Amino acid sequence: MLALSGIGAFSRGAKHRSVQTTQETPMQLRPFLAAVLIASAAFAASAQDLVVYHIDNAEAQAVKGLRNIRNHLDVDPTAKITVVTHANGVDFLMEGAKDPNGGAFSGPVSALAARGVKFEICEITLKNRNLKKEQFIQEAAFTPSGVVRIAKLQVAGSAYIKP
């Protein structure tokens, strides 16, 4: 006899071939089907937008970026957004930073952080610009390298947006 993946068996005879099926096959498939269903449900439950916003020039990108993020969350409140800043992009996260109209950046940043947005500052930038962590608003977190962090977030499935 020649077995085919546990689905059945062919018997080879001189004059005929017959297919023999077994009732074991559906039982053998149940654990596999259960695993597929569980994995599908887990994927559907976690199917959220993962997004990294890259800001390296606060003057040109901060206002637009914060507006984009607010709009993004208004349409998709389940999105998981991380803002990674480096170079001059860190400036809008400094204590007392103001937008071109004189409004404090801390208000919109705080409101977005309350909606789950993470704001990260490159520590290489701090060193290169001789800045201290204490100069930044409390919503800001720090990452060893902004560029490496962006790459790792993309590898992990985040979409990349540079406002």
Image: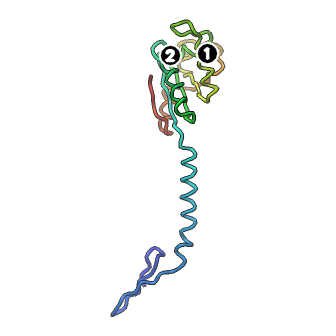
Gap between marks 2 and 1 measured at Cα: 12 Å
What residue appears at the point 47 percent right and 17 percent down from the top-left corner?
A: 61
Marking on residue 11: none
Q: What element carries label 1?
A: helix
What residue appears at the point 62 percent right and 16 percent down from the top-left corner?
A: 107
Q: Is residue 21 above or below residue 74?
A: below
Is 59 placed left or right of 119 in the picture? Answer: left
Marking on residue 63: 2
What residue appears at the point 52 percent right and 30 percent down from the top-left corner?
A: 149
Numbered marks: total: 2
Q: In this view, does 38 lie above or below 88?
A: below
Q: Which residue lies furthest to the bottom in this view?
A: 15
Q: Name the residue under label 1.
A: 106
Mark earlier in primary sequence (2, 1): 2
Is 18 placed left or right of 43 in the picture? Answer: left
- The quarter in which the N terminus is drawn is bottom left
**Residue type beneath disc 2:** Val
Q: What element carries label 2?
A: helix
Q: Residue furthest top?
A: 102
Task: For the residues labelled 2 and 1, say whether their Cβ atoms are less than 8 Å apart.
Answer: no
Query: How many residues crowd mark 2 within 10 Å: few (<14), some (14–19), many (20+)?
Result: some
**Residue type beneath disc 1:** Ser
Instruction: Name the one closer to the observer, 56 or 78.
Output: 78
